[in-house]
Image: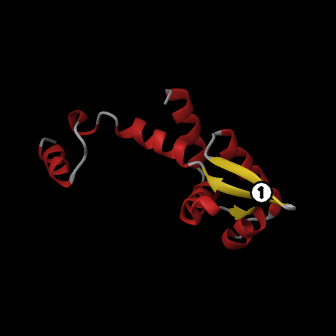
Amino acid sequence: METKKVLLALAALAQESRLALFRLLVQAGPAGLAASKIGEQLGIPPSSLSFHLKELAHAELLVSRQAGRFIIYSANMTTMNQMLGFLTENCCGGNPCTPLSLKQCTATE
């Protein structure tokens, strides 16, 4: 994943409502949620919700699909996993971060 794309995703998540929205969609899984359900669960008014959904979609953190008269939003797990991979790419000297290697990483600090 390119640095610019990671920065765009991190910037989109660096806001309380958008982070809560993204976490809610991660919990919902591939089935996703309609915008009305997201707004109800998070207490975000429709005009604000629309803005936050747009920002997350622009960062490719959301996917949407039409279901009748509703738009269903889901977390884009591919982008999320790419971002996490980018952030942990060189963790623990390039070794997988297992509980054993985490002890070694913190012991050398």
- Residue 81 vs residue 18: left or right? left
Q: Residue at x 64, y 58 (%)?
A: 17
**Where's the C terminus, which quadrant?**
top left
Residue 104: give x, y in percent of width and height.
Answer: 13, 46
**In the depicted structure, whether residue 95 falls above or below residue 70:** above
**In the depicted structure, whether residue 66 falls above or below residue 55:** below
Q: Residue at x 85, y 61 (%)?
A: 68
**Looking at the image, which is closer to me, 81 or 13?**
81
Residue type at tag 1: Ser
Circle 1 residues within 10 Å: few <14, some 14–19, many ≥20: few
Q: Residue at x 60, y 59 (%)?
A: 30
Colour option used: secondary structure
The image quadrant of residue 24 is bottom right
Q: How many marks?
A: 1
**In the depicted structure, whether residue 79 falls above or below residue 28:** above
Label 1: which residue? 48
Residue 60: give x, y in percent of width and height.
Answer: 63, 41
Residue 9: give x, y in percent of width and height.
Answer: 57, 40
Residue 47: give x, y in percent of width and height.
Answer: 83, 57
**Looking at the image, which is closer to me, 9 or 66?**
66
Q: Secondary structure at mark 1?
A: helix
Q: Residue at x 35, y 40 (%)?
A: 88
- Residue 96 vs residue 36: left or right? left
